[in-house]
Amino acid sequence: MALYVQKFGGSSVANIERIGQVADKVQRFHADGHQIVVVLSAMSGETNRLLGLAREISSSPSPREQDLLVSTGEQVTIALLAMALEQRGVPAVSMTGWQVPIRTDSAHGKARVQEIDGDHVRERLNAGSVVVVAGFQGVDLDGHVTTLGRGGSDTTAVALAAVLKADECQIYTDVDGVYTTDPRVVAEARRLDSITFEEMLEMASQGSRILQIRSVEFAGKYNVPLRVLHSFQDGPGTLITTEQETPMEQPIISGIAFNRDEAKLTIRGVADTPGVAFRILGPISAANIEVDVIVQNVAEEDNTTDLTFTVGRQDYEQALHILQQTGEELGARQVTGTTSIAKVSIIGVGMRSHAGVASRMFAALARENINIQMISTSEIKVSVVIDEKYTELAVRALHGEFGLDTPLVTRA
Amino acid sequence: MALYVQKFGGSSVANIERIGQVADKVQRFHADGHQIVVVLSAMSGETNRLLGLAREISSSPSPREQDLLVSTGEQVTIALLAMALEQRGVPAVSMTGWQVPIRTDSAHGKARVQEIDGDHVRERLNAGSVVVVAGFQGVDLDGHVTTLGRGGSDTTAVALAAVLKADECQIYTDVDGVYTTDPRVVAEARRLDSITFEEMLEMASQGSRILQIRSVEFAGKYNVPLRVLHSFQDGPGTLITTEQETPMEQPIISGIAFNRDEAKLTIRGVADTPGVAFRILGPISAANIEVDVIVQNVAEEDNTTDLTFTVGRQDYEQALHILQQTGEELGARQVTGTTSIAKVSIIGVGMRSHAGVASRMFAALARENINIQMISTSEIKVSVVIDEKYTELAVRALHGEFGLDTPLVTRA
């Protein structure tokens, strides 16, 4: 008998029929003798509907009131699923964030979980009930309802799994696992049986948006085995776990990620004085624009430097405007930018112990005549920025180069 | 500076525009220096929408889960109104039932308020905030969300007013006060400046369904001055209060109520033995059919008796079927019934000290050739059951007879 925390997202509980399908699935696990905690999101679209009502009233609604408002979305789905389970003869009880309680700080709209009291949940589990918990929400020390921010239901599930020492935290989604790369781009892309937390973090931040990054970090920190599964198809999914002790069996590269949602900006011919990077990027950050890749090369002979960085494509116009102002202030020679770029990354814990992975990547791209505009590396990742039109070509070339087209030895 | 509890029903918060109008009204009271607690219902239709979802899942959804589900309706409106107030520069904070907290028993769907802790509310009022409380809901000792049943928002408002010792509990509705009778039937019907709790109870149970009976009882018990006002029109409304010490200034009759939603059933020629009334009405109650007027006359010379009673018209067919069975068992001579009846009542605390009110009523009806089928009296009310087609004629005749066509001396 195992204890599972099972999280279902908004599209899995989008209507009464789907809620019934989730109940059927949970019922099977319960019938097999497992203890089940279900974590739910709001029906898809409901959170946006509620936020729309708030925006009709005020352009800057009180964060406290907004949290109380949107937290009703999950309250509805947990009550409905508990009813559906009881209708099937499965004892069930729903719990809101404050009923568990899930204690958070008071940062409305992006609260962080501080402490979960698992006693109520455990008591109900031991009495044989399925416990259905509202994701995405908590309560602060003053009794105000808080929300964890978008995707926070994953965090709720992982945090509950950690506190309850669950055997597995299962995240049910609209995909059947984590793939070596996007199957729409590379037909040979394969589902991974397992992936490490660190690799998953890099895959997620690179655009494989299956799991919320925070929840993966959280799972890694508390060593909660996390499994990504399809909501309505059977299958083993992908287990996200700590690094195996047998690196020799691991492939060097676990996956290829790519992101076409970025834009690139360059400022040229700026006097290379201490603090110049801050003077350039400070105003960008101040405008709440997130910067991803940053590359600054060594200074030119005339003691000026060039700096290039990428931002989300939706922020491009605003970032360009800010950078042009900064350029004037600093007497820059030129400010340029483009949105037609893509970032392609190879990811794998195996590259730590293998030299030459980056150069093998560059060679593969060169063979396809793909020019590399920027390079950025981390311990388990190498990213390049290239012309957007070569994205598919680059991903396919790298997928083949690193042996991902052929089945792996099953890991974990 | 006064402390007002102001309750707005579902049609007053049916959409964003109306919520804005409520905020405008509350803002004016706040600007005048008053302390304001607002109690809200869910947007009209929302509770039924949520109950519809529950019924799609289960024909008998768990009452606990159903309460958690429908309580989201008020949670949405309180958050939106608090936002609208803050948008207008009025400090405001919303509170759900559990946040106040409003403690109830555990009778889900029809919970009774047991205790309200007014400290949180008072603290916020003293800090200058408007406090917006979710009506209709509470929390039991185990932390389960409960609801007070339909119309329970009135009860929430009155209970809060009692605990906070509010100067007035104002119930905003779609009428501008309590009338001497239905203005659609008698053009001369007038708004009453005031009415006693007892009179209001009789008016309400007679079909003037402005206020929930329970909330009026509650207000009377705790001596909370209650005022009925129009949500979107200015005016003094009607104050519902304890009986004045100056009965000479009071009219004998405060209002005429009538009800066309009842049906009449008669069983004739039953042996007049002890317990016969119970044997007749027991099976009706057992079927959860509410009985209103009951009349049993003295036994006939052959020691048989007749019994007549009224039920809600929607229960007529079922009640007739039950009564026919009972009639066979008891060897009754005849079982008859009709739905074409109306009940007309005169109501007034003044009749306590005035003899002959009932006979004056009967005389007025006789002058119009209206036959009286049943008579039932209480200390402050006389009801008659008549043929439905004479309803308007009877109400108009009585309205004139008791001087309600002419303006009253203002009471209270």
Image (cartoon, coloured by chain):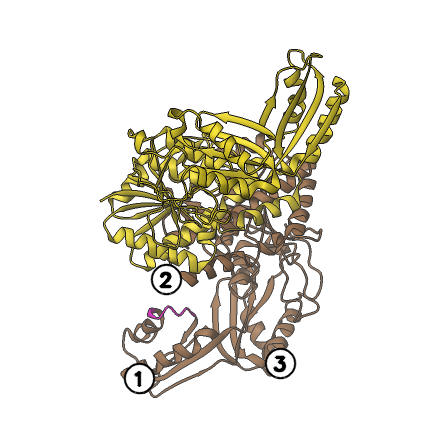
Chain colours: A yellow, B brown
- Magenta part mainly helix, strand or loop? loop
Q: Look at 62% across and 75% down and name the residue there.
A: B392
Q: Earlier in the sequence, mark 3 or mark 2?
A: 2
Which residue in the structure is indicated by mark 1? B303
Disc 3 packing (10 Å; few <14; some 14–19; many ≥20): few
Q: Look at 56% across and 39% down and name the residue there.
A: A65
At label 2, the amino acid type is Ser
Where residue B109 appears, as percent x and y from the top left, is 41, 55
- Labels 3 and 2 within one chain: yes
Chain label for disc 1:
B
Q: Earlier in the sequence, mark 2 or mark 1?
A: 2
**Per the image, is A50 magenta?**
no
Where residue B164 appears, as percent x and y from the top left, is 52, 38
Where residue B227 appears, as percent x and y from the top left, is 60, 50
Q: In 3D space, how far apart are the residues under numbered discs 3 and 2 (Cα atoms)?
A: 53 Å
Q: Look at 57% across and 59% down and name the residue there.
A: B210
The magenta stretch is: B286-291
Q: Which mark is residue B367?
A: 3
